[in-house]
Image (cartoon, rainbow, N blue to C red):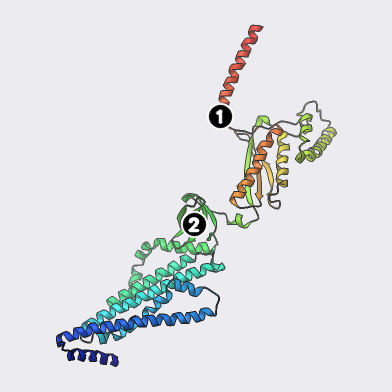
Amino acid sequence: MDYGKDVADWIYQLLIKWGVPQDYAIYVKLIALIFIVAAIAWVVDKVARQIILQAVSRIASRTKTDIDDILVEHHVFRNIAHIAPAIFIRFVLPVIFSDFQDYTLFFREVIDIYIIVAFVLFFQAVLRSMNKILRKIPLFKDKPVESYTQLLNIVNYVFGFLFIVSELTGKSLVTFFTALGAASAVLILTFKDTILGFVASIQLSANDMVKVGDWVSFEKYGADGDVIEINLTTIKVQNFDKTITTIPTYAFISDAFKNWRGMQESDGRRIKRSISFKISSVRFCTPEMLERYRKYQLVADYIDHRQHDINDYNTQNNIDKSELINGRNMTNLGIFRKYMLEYLEKHPAIHKEMTLMVRQLEPTEIGVPLEVYCFSKDQRWVNYEYIMSDLFDHYLSAARYFDLEIFERPTGTDFATASQYSVEQKRDEKNQDKEG
C-alpha cells in the first residue's frame, strides 16, 4: 500500500513538474492511476487464468477423464480468474481515490458486488459442468440430475441476491433470514411450482417411477413417446411423431400415466387382439366337415385324438347319434380355436416361455370373439406391428376354411345387394305363379 502511495505521489509530482496546474493535476493523476490499475488488473486476470489452466492441465494429464474439457467448455476457470483482478482493484482503491475519499466507499461496494456476481457465475458454471459430468456416468444417466442442479442454482442465485442486498444496505444476513422466515408463506406461494417439482423429482427418483429414456403414455397431456429430459418443473416427452410434449413434473405424481419400461426390459411384448365371428356360423361338425378339416396339418392330430375320446364317451353312454346334437361333439369354432393356438406355438416370432393362449370371450351383439393373448420376441414397435399383422392376416384368411364367418357391420353395398336380391326373388315368385 505504501508503494502505491509512492507511485501516486511520483505521478503527481511529475505532472506538477510538467506544468500541469495543481487543481487539474489531481484529476489527471486519477485518470493515470485508473489506466495503470486497469492494465495491471488485465495482466492479473491473464496470469491467474494461465496459472489455473496449467494446474488443471497437470491434473488432467494424470487422468483419462474429460472432466477438464467440460469445465473449460462451461467457463469455470474464466469465472474464477475474474475474481483475482477484482480483489487487486479493491486493495488499491484507497490509493486511486486518495484525493477523493468520499468515492472510495462507493467503488468498494461496486467491487464487492462484482466479486459476489463473479462467485455466483462461478458456482453456476460448476453446476452446469456437474450436470454434464454426472450425465456421462452410467449410475446417473437416467436420474433427474438436472432437477437437483436447477434447485442448487436457485439457491445460488438467492444467496447471491441476499449478499448483494446485504452489501448495499449494510445489514447482516441474519436480519434477512429473519425477514424471510416471516415472509415464508409468500415465498411458498411464489415458488409453489418449483417446490412441487422438486418434491416430485425426489419421489420419481426414489421410487424409480420414470427416468430419461423411458417410453411413457400420458393420455391427459396427449403424450406418447420417450422421456428426453427431466428437470425441476417439467418433463419433456418426445412423441413418436417427433413433437415434444412438456408435462409438469408433479403431474407424474398426481395423475395416472403408463410407463412401458417393464415391457421393454422383459423378454417380450404383449399381443392382445380378438376376432369376432357370426354366431350363426358356429355349428357342430358333421363327419364330412371333420374329414375335410383333417387335411389341415395343424389340427389333424387334434381332431383324431379328440374324436376318439368323443366316440368312446358316446358309445359308453349309448348316445343316439342319429341327431347331431346328441352327446358330445366338436364344433368348427372349437377346432379353429385350436388351429389358432397351434399356429402361435409354431410361429418363430412368438415367445413360447411367456403366457400363450387363445380364449373365447363373452358373446356380444357383434358376435362371439376369439382373443389371442401372447408375447412377441421382438419389442421394437415396427417389428411388433408386423408380427401382429402377420398373425391376423393368416387368421382372417383361414377362418373361411372352417366354415366360419367373420362379423363386420353391413355397408351400403351390402344393403344394395340385399335389396337387389329381394327384388329378384319377388320377380321369380311372380313368374312361378304365372307358370303355375
Compared with residue 414, is residue 151 higher up or lower down, i.e. above or below?
below
283 or 396, which lies in front?
A: 396
Residue 203 position in % (x across, y down):
51, 63
Asked if residue 127 can be seen in this view, the reply is: yes
Where residue 252 is drawn, which disc sits there? 2
Q: Which residue lies furthest to the front in this view?
A: 18
30 or 304, which lies in front?
A: 30
Residue 98 position in % (x across, y down):
23, 87
Check contact, mark 1 vs mark 2: CB within 8 A: no
187 to the left or right of 297: left
Q: Residue at x 65, y 43 (%)?
A: 390
Residue type at tag 1? Thr
Residue type at tag 2? Phe
Label 1 Cα neighbours within 10 Å, binned few <14 / some 14-19 / many ≥20:
few
> What element does badge 2 sit on?
helix
Which comes sooner in the sequence, label 1 or label 2? 2
165 to the left or right of 422: left
Q: In this figure, which residue is indicated by the disc labeled 1?
A: 411
Where residue 135 is drawn, which disc sits there? none
Q: Which residue is drawn at 53% across and 79% down?
A: 61
